[in-house]
Amino acid sequence: MMKLSTMATGLASEDVINSLIKNWAHDEETIRLWRASSNFVIAYSKDEEHYFLRFSFEQEKSIEHIQAELEYMSYLNVNRYPCVSPVASLNGNYIEATQSPEGKYYAVVFKAAQGISLDENLTELQFEDWGKALGTLHRLSEAYEPVSTKRGDWQDVLNGMASILQRHHEKEAIVELEHLIKELQAIPVLKSNYGLIHYDFQLDNLFYEDDTRIFHVIDFDDAFYSWYVQDIVTALDDILEDELTLDSPPVKAFLNGYKSVKPVSKEELACLPIFKRFMKLYKFSRILWSLEGVELENAPEWLPPIKMKFENVRDQLRSSFKNAI
């Protein structure tokens, strides 16, 4: 999720896109906007091969943040984990930058993932394959040691939340954050249950191959150090929500796949409700942050409906914190 003001600025001019994409070989007529969420993503082709250019504003994503992501993805590629690969620019760089009136933008390019995007109607076998893909990722994370830049951890995330909540005087959410910190601090940190997690292992970042039963993974942009079970929560909650319980058939199938490559204890799974609360609070703080500085005067026509949607979700989450006290 980016600031809506950044989204409006970034989409208002083609100069930034043109300045960045010229660093990679491309067929001009194939360039199109794919999505704008936590980053801007441009789809394009070259000689019938498909690629995605992802770029972000320096005040939202530092170059160190991107370097750490690419380093981890390189480690996964070396270990033959099915994630997308970054593509070097014509200058031989994996990260390119351009200066605009509002500041600097950083860009990377990835090859398109193999497979197809799945909707919410997964089969039991696909849930199992999904769990296996996440368990395999966590197994590799156990052995990962960054060479240059290390990603932040859950405490950094909570510190960021605290800053936003205090800035907006969200008293009920701040109380919830204080409770959450105490509960998280009580969870053991072991090599087997804690490491670098994806945090966005949801279906819109996964592409499935039926013949091989393999999920190909994109977007490690949100990764941070936390307990592995948190990735299980954030992966499944997007489609299961209130059905995310241990006796749910989809959850059982997912965990069967996960456990086929990596053990997960009953004690770890007992923490699922804690991480659901973490996810809710994180989403709330990110929406507050995203709405900062939004100006509707002379805004593009798509902005007011998105702003209203964000405000509705914000208000629903705020009410849940009030009801919990």
Image (cartoon, rainbow, N blue to C red):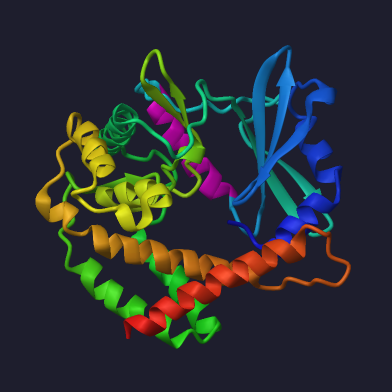
Pick the residue in front: 167 or 130: 130
Quadrant in the rendering for residue 102: bottom right
> Looking at the image, which residue sits at the far right?
298
Specify the segment rendered in magenta: 63-77
- Is residue 99 depicted above or below 102 in this figure? above
Residue at point 66% right, 54% down?
A: 58
- For the N terminus, the quadrant is bottom right
Q: Main secondary structure of the magenta part?
A: helix
Q: Would residue 161 be found to the left or right of residue 314 on screen? A: left
| Residue 212 on the magenta span | no
- Residue 219 seen: no
User: Horizontal placement of 13 versus 114: left or right?
Assistant: right
Q: Position of residue 141 (x, y in %)?
A: 30, 38
Q: Nearer the viewer, residue 262 or 104?
A: 262
Q: Is residue 2 visible?
A: yes
Quarter-of-image position of residue 91? top right
Q: Is residue 74 magenta?
A: yes
The tally of labels here is 0
Q: Residue at x 61, y 72 (%)?
A: 311
Classify residue 182 as left or right of residue 211.
Answer: left
Name the residue at 41% across, 65% down: 280
Q: Position of residue 265 (x, y in %)?
A: 11, 47
Measured as percent of width and height from the top left, residue 188 is found at 15, 59
